Image: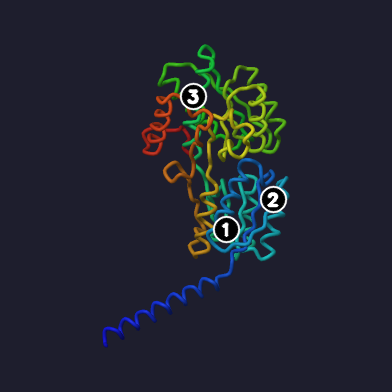
Amino acid sequence: MKKISISAVAVVIAFLVLFTNCKKKEDVQPLKVGFVTGLSSLNDGGFNQMAYSGLLAAASDISITYEVRESKTAGQIDSNIRYFASNGFNVIISLGYDAGQATLDAALTYPSVKFILLDYSFATIPSNMVCATYKVDQASFPCGFLAAYQAWHKNPVQAVAAYVGGPNIPAIQQFILSFKNGVDYFNAKYGTSVSTIGANAASFNDTLQGAFLADSLIQQGAEVLFACAGKTGNGVLYKVKERSKTAIGVDTDQFNTIPQVGPYLLTSCMKRLEVFVRSELNSIYNDQFHGGQNIQSSLANQGVGLAPYHSYETLIPDSIKQAVVTIQTGITNGTILTGWSK
C-alpha cells in the first residue's frame, strides 16, 4: 500500500508542476516589437528583408506582436524609433550606420525599452541596448578569391574583378578591403595577375546609380562584380544580368531574394542578421537580454558566410571549392588573415 501511495503522490505532484508551468507560460505577455527598416523598403532583397525574416522566425518560437515602419530618410528612422518607444513597445529593432545615433539617443531617453541595433556599435552601450556586429571580412575574403578565379577563367590575359560599395564608411570598407585581399590571395596562390577595380556609391538606396557604376566597371573589363551597397547594389545585379557577366550578392542569399538575377550569381556574401534577431528575441522573452554588449557574428558561429553556388555549382572546379573551404578554416583558426583588424 505504501508503494502505491507514493506513486499516486508523485503523479499528483507531476500534474501540479505541469499545470503550474503551463499557466505561468500562458500568463507571460507577448513581446511588443517594433521593427524600423534601414533606408529602403522592407522587401529589399537584402539587409531589411533578412532581419525581418529573423523577426518572423522568432514569432514562430515565442509570443510576439510586431509592427514594421519603413524608412526612406534618416529623419524617418529617428521618428519611427521614437514612435515605437512612445507607444508601449517593449523591443525596438533598428539597422545599420544610419540608425546608430538615433537608436543610442532613444535608448538613453527611454530606459525601460529594450533596443536591438544591427550592424553598428558604440564604445559604450547602454544596459537597455544590445548591438550586433558582423565579421563580414571573413566572408568577403573568400568571395574575393572566388571572384578572382571567375575573372581569370573568363579572361586569363586581362582578368578584372570589381566591386560597387555603398558610401565610404567603415562597414563598407570592411567588405572591400578583405575582398581585394581575397583576390590577392588567389594571385599569390596561382601566380596570376587578376586586378581589382571598384567604385563607391553615394547612398544605399539608388539602384540607378548602382547600374550606372556597374556599367562603367564592365566597360573597364570587369567580368565579376561584387555588389555590397544595399538596394544600390541591386542595380548592379540587374546590370550584370543585362550584360551577361557574373555577380556576387550581399547580406542575404540573393539567388532567393532576387531570383531573376539568380543565374548570374556566383554566390552571396551573407550577414546572417536573421540568426541574431531570432536568438536575441528569444533571449529577451526568457529574461536573458544581452543589454550593454556588442555581440560579434563570425564564420565560427555561422553569423556570416557564403551562400550556395546554385547555378555555378557544376561550373566551379572541385579544387577551387576545396580551396574556399580551406580558406574559411584558416580564417576561423587564425592562420589566414583577412587584413581587417578593427
Relative to 154, is 258 above or below?
Answer: below
At mark 3, the secondary structure is loop
Q: Residue at x 55, y 19 (%)?
A: 160
Q: Position of residue 52 (x, y in %)?
A: 61, 50
At horizontal 41% and vertical 26% (from top left) the residue drawn is 318
Q: Which label lies toward us, 1 or 2? A: 1
Tell me which label, 1 or 3, sits earlier in the chain: 1
As drawn, 17 above or below 303:
below
Q: Which residue is mark 1?
A: 59
Q: Residue most toward the bottom?
A: 1
Q: Nearer the viewer, mark 3 or mark 2?
A: 3
Instruction: Find residue 250 and report its image quarter.
Output: top right
Q: Nearer the viewer, residue 93 or 66?
A: 66
Residue on which the image places disc 3: 315
Q: Quadrant of residue 205?
A: top right
- Callout 1, which amino acid? Ala
Asked if marks 3 and 2 touch (Cβ < 8 Å), the reply is no
Task: From the viewer's perspective, tell me whether residue 10 is left or right of residue 152.
Answer: left
Residue type indicated by callout 2: Ile
Q: Can residue 170 be seen in this snapshot?
A: no
Which of the two discs, 1 and 2, labels the residue nearer the N terminus? 1
- Front-most of residues 37 and 107: 37
Mark 1 and mark 3: Cα distance apart in space: 39 Å
Q: Secondary structure at mark 1?
A: helix
Helix, strand or loop for disc 2: helix
The image position of residue 104, as x and y in percent, is 61, 54
